[in-house]
Image: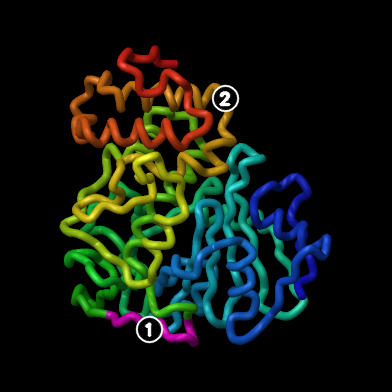
Amino acid sequence: MVVPGAAPALAEDPVAALSHRLEQCAVQLPFTGPYGYLAALLDLLRVPVASQIAVFSKTSIQSLHIEPANPRVLFFNNAVSVGWVRGGFIELAAQDPGEHNAIHYYILLQRPDERLTRREDCVRCHRSGLTQLRSVVSTPDGIPSGEIDVDSRTPFSELWGGWFVTGNAIPPGHMGNRGFANAERREIKPVLDPKFSLTPSSDVVALMVFAHQMHMMNLLAHPDNVNELVDYLLFIDEAPLPGPIRGNSGFAQEFSAAGPRDHLGRGLRDFDPGTRLMRYPCSYMIYSDAFDALPTATKEAIYSRMSRILSGHEPDPRYLRLSAADRQAVIAILRDTKKDLPAWFGGTEPRTQQ
């Protein structure tokens, strides 16, 4: 059993809450098999195994362990991400709605009787406490030579450099599963057997969702620019996909089943079968604890901006990408499923901007 961690008493993120439960002996975290604490930790934090994605580029504090033959795997839900690499330790990032949606970082060494430990030095790599999926140009042994931050707006051709990508339908043209030596492209076959990962997948749908979510978490942690936050929430500048994507881990089915639905059975976790990620263009992160923890005035401004766009009162041509059917569906879904939605939301009259 793990000795309880030393997370700050005021932290209210899910990892801090787990540390407190361990301290109270309310739960146990066994150290078992080749994965040590990993499987039990995911279970207690309610992080699905099917969310596994795998990175082979040396872009972590554990770069000495990471290579294509020994990738680092990550798992996530809408508040926590967990990273593990064979031979290293477990890394965690969690969003704390009780501290202005700050993102806290923890590690758990892979030895019996270790503890969850809060790490302040992680912000040296995670700029200003932010967390992000990055795409890199990588050599065949995983050494990066350039990188970009990736989110829903990133062109498909720039996605997943340094990452393994698996699925039943993946359009060509992305940067995953490849390395470069002397400008020559080399394909790298994913190595995802039980020695290195919990599943044989680095699911393409999970990769897309993770990229969207990480930037959404950053915006919720720094919600000063309401227009930018709302545009991202509504996928206004989303880069189109060149074709449908389908994963191979069961992540999409598990993810879709987890969200609320309106009286017609529609939900913001439904995926689109065509050239965009989500069927209904509004982020499921609107249901997150991080969103609910925003100051009342900030949420009022967000809802006002969303209502103006979705009711068709925003004249900027950028918003024409939202069809009338899309806008009506999002309004109806939110009215049925978002408890604190103002009564005026989506009305026919424009709401005065805050």
Evaluate whether residue 143 shows in this view.
no
Residue 37 at x, y percent in the picture: 65, 75
The image position of residue 312, as x and y in percent, is: 25, 22
Q: Is residue 151 magenta?
A: no
Q: Which mark is residue 216?
A: none
Is 193 included in the stretch rendered in magenta?
yes
Q: Quadrant of residue 310?
A: top left
Q: Nearer the viewer, residue 40 or 253?
A: 253
Q: Position of residue 132 (x, y in %)?
A: 44, 54
Mark 2 in CB contact with mark 1 (< 8 angstroms): no
User: Which image quarter: residue 142?
Assistant: bottom left
Picture coordinates of residue 113, whole percent (x, y): 77, 76
Which residue: 49% across, 52% down? 131
**Magenta segment, which residues?**
188-196
Q: Quadrant of the N terminus?
A: bottom right
Amino acid at circle 1: Val
- What residue sits right under mark 1 in the picture? 191
Q: Which residue is mark 2?
A: 296
At x 60%, y 68%, the residue is: 43
